Image (spheres, grey):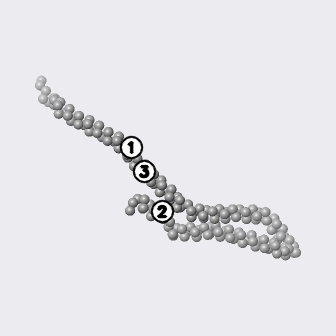
Amino acid sequence: MSELERELELAKPNPITQASYRRQVRLEVYLPLALFSLTFAALVIYFLRGQVATVSGWADAGLILLLLPALVIGLLLSIVLGGLAYGIGLLLVRIPPFAFQVQRVFYRIAIGAERAMRLTARPFVLVQSNAAKLKRGGQIVKSIFEPPAADESTEQI
């Protein structure tokens, strides 16, 4: 099994992690969106029912009218948030295969760069090693023809 195949095995998605992520998205994104949408729909239905003949009804209608601009802005922001959540969900499905392909391309580039580096450095290493061999061979030949050095203990007085 080559190194690339091992990396392919490691890059496969973990089903346990994916299930946990989906559960977390449902609780943190879709549940608040649904609760807000239901609350807004209940307020709209209550307001459109037309039973505002009592003082309490008029107070409720006035409160709804005061809250309506904030609710509309909140609804628009919720729609934007829902669209972002949906778009990110699509991207999370589509990006990993492309990211993995890009990773494989860069891995192949790295292998090619390493081969090119070795091929480029090889002549210089050969020249330096051969020069070192010749230098050492010259030192050996020179040491054969040199007279032995006189020891201090054998000097005549």
User: Which label's residue is closer to the chain start, 3 or 2?
Assistant: 2
Q: Which three-letter amino acid code belongs to the residue tagged 3? A: Gly
Residue in the picture at 61% in, 69% down: 26
Determine the residue positioned at 47% across, 53% down.
106
Quarter of the image for residue 143 reads top left
Q: CA distance from mark 3 to mark 2?
A: 22 Å
State the separation of the CA atoms marked 3 and 1: 12 Å
x and y percent of residue 56 in the render? 85, 73
Question: Mark number for residue 112?
Answer: 3
Relative depth, front residue between 127 and 154: 127
Residue on which disc 1 sits: 120
Instruction: Kindly identify the amino acid type of the residue bearing the numbered disc 1.
Output: Thr
User: Could you say which disc has been placed on residue 33 in the image?
Assistant: none
Residue 45 seen anywhere in this rendered image of the structure: yes
Q: Which residue in the protein does label 2 denote?
A: 11
Single out the mark in the foreground, 1 or 2.
Answer: 1
